[in-house]
Amino acid sequence: MGTIKSAWEIALEKTQGLTLDKNELKRKESFKKGRAFGLKALENSQEWAQTELRACLEDASVDQASFIGGAVEAAIAPFQLSASGPLPIQQASYLFKLVTKKEGSKLFDQMQQVIQRYQDELENLREAIVQQLGPRLRQRAEQMARQAGVSTNYVMERDPEFLKIFNQNAENIRQQLQEYLDRLKAEIKRVL
């Protein structure tokens, strides 16, 4: 009959060849701390960020380069093509300058411009589709409603044909601008 092993013995066998790289663990933890600090810094005052940064960097358990990398990652995180509303451009630019001691406001301005361009192009696309297809789509919907004997509150943005055309063209716009936004983010990370 075979030997029955305890959970402890099985765990020891599975982890036998594994080694713990303490430096890698320290870098990962520092990156997480930097990211958490960065996200809080985007929401708090500059004075808070200065004071908290000083305290974090004085901590001997923190790998400073990884911490700064995490903070920069947090600074660029809000800059997404789907973003709507005001972006924290001043806070992000300040955070970047605070942790890297380098100027990056032009890159943050460019990221904001890319996002604004994306939003403008989507609105222009919507208006063009409404102008070109609007009368035909509305007429078709009204005709279908009359045939069914119901009244309709037609909303073009819900029309399947409108959505299909809009989504196809919006995806092309998004791909082009996402590449540019990704290059700007990579440029910001290279400053590190």
Image: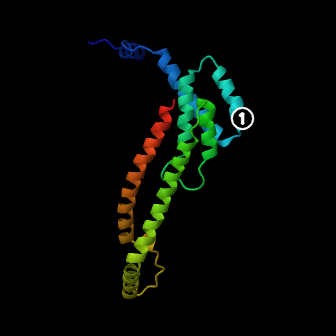
Quadrant in the rendering for residue 106: top right
Q: Residue at x 42, y 66 (%)?
A: 125
Label 1 SS: helix
Residue lying furthest left: 1
**Front position in the image: 146 or 162:** 162
Disc 1 crowd, CA 10 A, few/some/many (<14, 14-19, 20+): few
For residue 124, above or below residue 38? below
Quadrant in the rendering for residue 54: top right
For residue 91, above or below residue 23? below
Q: How far across and down, in percent of the image, does residue 182 sit? A: 43, 43
Q: Residue at x 66, y 28 (%)?
A: 53
| Quarter placement of the N terminus | top left
Quadrant in the rendering for residue 98: top right
Q: How far across and down, in percent of the image, does residue 22 sit? A: 49, 15
**Front position in the image: 7 or 25:** 25
Q: How far across and down, in percent of the image, does residue 116 sit? A: 52, 56
Number of residue marks? 1
Q: Amino acid at mark 1?
A: Trp
What colour scheme has been applied to the protein in the rendered image? Answer: rainbow
The residue at which mark 1 appears reads as 48
Q: Residue at x 64, y 19 (%)?
A: 59
**Front position in the image: 47 or 35:** 47
Q: How far across and down, in percent of the image, does residue 69 sit? A: 53, 30
**Front position in the image: 79 or 26:** 79
